[in-house]
Amino acid sequence: MRCLFCKNNSDNSRSKEHIIPESLGNIEHILPAGWVCDNCNNYLSRKVEAPFLETSYGQRARFDMAIPSKKGRIPIGTGFHPHSRSKVNLMIEKDVLSIFAADGEDETGFIQSVRLQSRGTIYVPSAGDPELNYETARFIGKIGLEVLAHRYMNIEGWNDELVNKVELDELRNYVRKGKPGFVWPINIRRIYEANHEFSDEVDKSFQVLNEWDILFIPSSQIDEAVGEFYAIIAILGMEYAINLGGPELDGYLRWLKNNNEKSYLYISKED
């Protein structure tokens, strides 16, 4: 077996790869050891996943949904206490919310203000939407390649097929080696609220933290010599569409327009 990213032999690798990090609620969808070698697994965790998780959006989204890291920690949230005009931090531990003055604020004044009030208000900004930047692009690129591997991982011979596929080299090199200053194009949009509750056939409600699928657009639909593969990924209600074969989205945007802007994640389930 060889690594999906560096292409080196990975027979002795022991690390399993979470396609979406545990810090975003994924505990089920994992690539078996060997698909991503130990060296790449460690690199991707430090240099690709962590920078995205540490963005303002990454921190706030995880706080809003109270999603713990694999160490069991929920990121600290931020807010504003108008009565004392203080910035505050919010921390959740064991389902208990604690509020305290942020670094550099007048903690004594904040405490006194709270004690003088029988009721009060804390403004907490929502996570909003992620920016399309270098951190987001590499993070989604990494997930996209692993989604493709997950789709075919049980088919004999497909490890070699994906590792040898030169059409994936530009994206795999972008993820594994980086290209500072270049942002791989990704279509980002919200398709449902992060805390949206779905219901099944027996009316049980549930939330969807992440889901994905692979969209293949034949060449006849995009006026190209060859078809295109896109990973369509939803994380906390945000949908990311990335072309796995090259840094362009024209084919997907035409497909989206022709399908009334519907998400492929749900069109594919209806068919």
Image: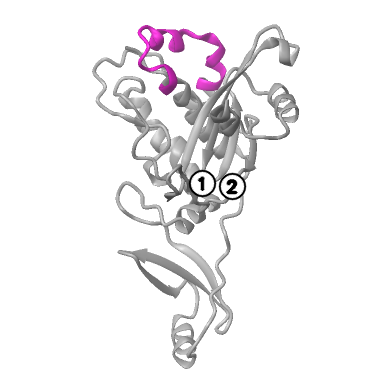
| Residue 154 on image: x %, y % | 35, 16
Quadrant the N terminus occupies: top left
Q: Main secondary structure of the magenta part?
A: helix
Q: Is residue 242 left or right of residue 117?
A: right
**Figure disc tally:** 2
Picture layout, residue 46 above or below residue 32: below
Q: Is residue 208 left or right of residue 226?
A: left
**Magenta residues (range):** 150-172
Picture layout, residue 116 above or below residue 56: below
Identify residue for label 2: 192
Picture layout, residue 57 above or below residue 146: below
Tell us which disc is closer to us: 1 or 2. 2
Q: Is residue 118 left or right of residue 95?
A: right
Q: Secondary structure at mark 1?
A: loop
| Residue 46 falls in image quadrant | top left
Q: CA distance from mark 1 to mark 2?
A: 8 Å
Instruction: Classify 10 Å Cα crowding around label 1: few (below 14), some (14-19), many (20 and above).
Output: many
Amino acid type, callout 1: Leu
Amino acid type, callout 2: Tyr
